[in-house]
Image (cartoon, rainbow, N blue to C red):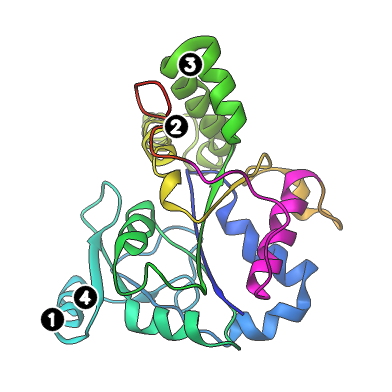
Amino acid sequence: MTCVLLYGPAGAAKSKIRPALEKFHPELVAGMNAQRTFIYKAWLKPGEVAGVDAMRATGNTLREMKATIPNFLLLKAGRSNHYEGFDLEWLKRMAEDPKAVGIFRVSTEGAEAISRHPYVSGLQGLNIIFLSPFSRQELIDLRARGGMPLVDQQIAFATIGNISKSVVDKFGYTARAKELITNSAKRAIAVMRTGHFARYVMPLKEGTLDPVWAADTLTGSAERVVNSIALILKGQAPDYYDEKWDEDLLAYKDPT
């Protein structure tokens, strides 16, 4: 078995993967529920569940944990001033346990830091997965047509399409909603440039709001991604994933 960490831009359906696994791969439920999270946050995002997505901890508590727990990683989350902590001792224990089945959503900053951390970066049982609205080939094709400005434009458009309805439903057609949508689109452009930190990049066309997630059967890339992650959680090789991205894929120069 293994441990999976998911990250990706806003609206990339990261929150849909675990419920889909529970629904379509019930054989994994007991194992997933048996693993407590290794993530600690001073502030949970809307939709995150305390004890499942992260444990609540104040900023002072997180700093105390950093000072007293070996290999405890402390970071600022995104553009906010909120801290998040990662208990890498616990993460390593899960990744090395042949019976453990763990799946967690992590921030972009967390995924990058964990992928680089010498204590856990080489663990065979640790699989960091980037969920992308575009495949590597699609990005290369866009770049050939219009350069990086077109790539960034399409990333922004995809993010806006994936999140606009939920933001407007919550905030209405307000300046606050416009600000959130604009900031999420800008951040998605930066997040897409971190895909090379992942062991696997999985193109996922069905965003958070796609009706496929509520259907009785999964279809399209949603089905392929969920089934591939299920295989990874069972300690097998996935049958669907894009090539591992190189660092220059979305850089403002010709890819190598």
Q: Which residue is under mark 3?
A: 150
Residue at position x 32%, y 78% from top? 87
SS for dot 4: helix
Whole-angstrom CA distance, mark 2 to mark 3, is 14 Å
Disc 4 to disc 2, C-alpha distance? 35 Å
Task: Give the mark nearest the N terminus, 1 or 3.
Answer: 1
Residue, disc 1: 67
| Direction front: furthest residue | 256
Q: Amino acid at mark 3?
A: Leu
Kind of residue sitting beneath label 1: Ala
Among the two numbered marks 1 and 2 on one chain, the one whose residue lies closer to the N terminus:
1
The reply to whether the C-beta atoms of the residues labelled 1 and 2 are less than 8 Å apart is: no
Q: Earlier in the sequence, mark 4 or mark 1?
A: 4
Q: Which mark is residue 229?
A: none
Q: Nearer the viewer, mark 4 or mark 3?
A: 3
Mark 4 / mark 2, whichever is N-terminal: 4
Tell me, yes or no, whether the highlighted magenta stretch contains residue 116: no
Disc nearer the start of the sequence (4/3): 4
Residue where numbered disc 2 is placed: 249
Q: CA distance from mark 4 to mark 3?
A: 41 Å
Which quadrant holds the C terminus?
top left
Above or below: residue 24 compared with residue 201: below
The quarter holding residue 251 reads top left
Three-letter residue code for mark 4: Leu
Q: In the image, which residues are magenta?
A: 220-245
Disc number at residue 62?
4
